[in-house]
Image (cartoon, rainbow, N blue to C red):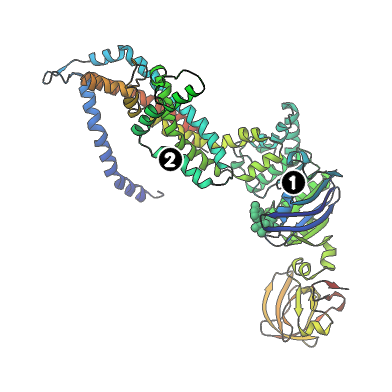
Amino acid sequence: MATRHARTAARIMISPAVLLLLGWMLVPLSMTVYFSFLRYNLLMPGMEEWTGWLNYEFFLTDPAFFDAIGNTLMLVGGVLLITIVGGVLLALLLDQPFWGQGVVRVLVIAPFFVMPTVSALVWKNMFMNPVSGLFAHAAKAVGLAPFDFLAHAPLLSIILIVAWQWLPFATLILLTALQSLDSEQLEAAEMDGANPLNRFVFIMLPHLARAITVVILIQTIFLLSIFAEILVTTNGGPGTASTNLTFLVYAQSLLQFDVGGGSAGGVIAIILANIVAIFLMRMIGKNLET
Amino acid sequence: MGQIVLKQITKSFGTVHVIPCLDLEIDDGEFVVFVGPSGCGKSTLLRLIAGLEDVSSGHIEIDGRDATAVPPAKRGLAMVFQSYALYPHMSVRNNIAFPLRMAGLDKAARSARVEAAAKILNLTDYLDRRPGQLSGGQRQRVAIGRAIVREPAAFLFDEPLSNLDAALRVSMRQEITELHQSLKTTMIYVTHDQVEAMTMADKIVVLNAGRIEQVGTPLALYATPANVFVAGFIGSPRMNLIDGAEAARHGAATLGIRPEHLALSRDDGAWKGVVGLSEHLGSDTFFRVTVDGVGSLTVRQSGEVDVKRGDTVFLTPSAPHLHRFAATGEAMR
Ligand SMILES: Nc1ncnc2c1ncn2[C@@H]1O[C@H](COP(=O)(O)OP(=O)(O)OP(=O)(O)O)[C@@H](O)[C@H]1O
Ligand SMILES: [Mg+2]
């Protein structure tokens, strides 16, 4: 875009897309904001009336709200931790030359192609079920009492399920990054006396920093809105033990039929997501320059 | 100390025998240059000495100790890579200090040695930059600095100047030579540049397809090549190689004569030919002269000579400088 002419042309070219996106975003957003100021219950149609900030007050003072925020952060943080640590280790492993590399790489990526509801149900019924699940059988085989994952550690179970789904993504990105590392750098480090651990810490990890940032950014965006896995496994329970913000908004508007309260929750979720986004952008800006 | 002895080294990658069998002795303090055509195994040999590749069979001795199974870091050798292999996320200071850090030196000792190395290499002003913010020559110096601070028994260079432009190459060449004279450490230097090999080496090792063709001082190789390959490889422009009837007349399978050992005359001489292309360098002029029954020969004349394309000229080889080679390629003396 060197010339003024090219810049003008570029602006004209992208304007339809920008307008479309704006409309796409603005209409639902403004409707949500509008609903959030109404007393709007699906059980009492036609009774909508202006209530001011009351919906927000109720939503923000609801103890479930704080639980949901905590759960959301735990969910995002836990999955990020598992996928990045696991992804780096798996990438290191897959980067080694071994027989059947191609097949193994495809297999590693496979979980990413399974639909969230399906994989969550498979985990729930075939692995974590305290009676017929594989884990229960394994526990019984070694003489332990089966553990009811979804009842006693619901959030952890969901973190595990979601991490399993996202591990391939992280592995893939980190593997490609690892493969782009100049082998002469590693050899130079080897000659400089760096043992394998030092080579990992001083050469590989800094090289992976950018890829890790990208993984964090993309995953955070998707993990903030995890919903299907919770719906089909724990339904947010027991109590609010595995309710995140997305699920709370759903529960508010569709289980309690309170569209106004749900909309207020949605607006709050948008604000929180933007705060997270600002932090992420800062971090990425620092990491992606140079 | 930096005496390196290779005993019956072989190296294969799967079924590809890159180095069939090789013996070589490198004395302490020597500047040894490996030359040879692309793919002849120069880098592989250097990496075997460095320990980055394992030998398939044979022994490597460094300072009299068997180092065949010693890991790279413990061999006390430092390598400068063609791509420099600097650590992009570290400052120049940290790059140079990295081997010291790995060796467990404390911060004060590290920075003293980094400063000293930076001073030798004129890098003092750049210590806090990243490699990405340096020019090619500066990066090269950082890579050398990283090698110097370890005080190695020998330096290994793999075509270190091939990414630089001509002028910079000349000055870096002199810097490396000066470095060798002040440090007096063994240096092994891989290049495919004639001039680098001739000007820098104490000893040139000419490699071809993993075999050593000849080892000797630059001038010895130039004056008495052991075989046709060395004769054709050392010297620029190449030695004229003549075979057929003319060579048989001298009792050899191949006859070699360097361009500067052919006298050019307009009137009479041994071979009569027609001038083709000519290259005028100012100091010298090179002519391609096509001689019937002999072939196309390169002739070097000092300064400007008034001979044009299409002129008929006579060439006379200087008898003491004729090289005769047997059918096996070996020189006949
Ligand atoms: N890892 C490897 N696996 C298989 N063959 C290899 C490997 N490394 C090198 N070779 C082969 O060994 C031969 C020598 O390679 P080497 O890199 O030593 O050549 P070189 O003399 O350094 O050439 P250049 O001047 O082009 O750098 C080449 O034919 C190359 O194809
Ligand atoms: Mg090479």
- Chain to which mark 1 belongs: B
Give how far across and how far down residue B276 sits, in percent.
67, 80
Q: Is residue B313 visible?
A: yes
Chain at tag 2: A
**Quick one: SS at disc 1?**
helix
Q: Position of residue B236 (x, y in %)?
A: 74, 67
User: Which residue is at 69% across, 43% downward?
Assistant: B143
Foreground pick, B60 / B129: B60
Q: Bin the neighbour count of mark 2 within 10 Å (Cα to Cα): few under 14, some 14-19, many 20 and up.
A: few
Q: In the picture, residue B328 is in which quadrant?
A: bottom right
Ligand 1 appears in which quadrant?
Answer: bottom right
Question: What residue is pinned by disc 1?
Answer: B50
Mark 1 close to ligand 1, CB under 8 Å: no
Q: Position of residue B80 (x, y in %)?
A: 71, 46
Q: Work out which quarter of the rendered image holds the N terminus of chain B and state it.
A: top right
Residue A110, disc = 2
Percent from the top left, x then y, of residue B92?
65, 37
Q: Is residue A199 left or right of residue B244?
A: left
Query: Within 10 Å of the Cα at label 1, are there few (<14), some (14-19), or many (20+) other Cα atoms?
Result: many
Is the Cβ of the residue at disc 1 closer than 8 Å to that at disc 2?
A: no
Marks 1/2 same chain: no
The type of residue carrying mark 2 is Ala
Q: Amino acid at mark 1?
A: Ala
Q: Quadrant of residue B232?
A: bottom right
Real-space Cα distance between discs 1 and 2?
42 Å
Q: Relative to B215, say whether B46 is above or below.
A: above
Q: Is residue A270 visible?
A: no
Relative depth, front residue between B169 and A120: A120
Q: Please indicate whether residue A94 sits to the left or right of residue A197 in the image.
A: left
Q: Tell me the element at label 2.
A: helix
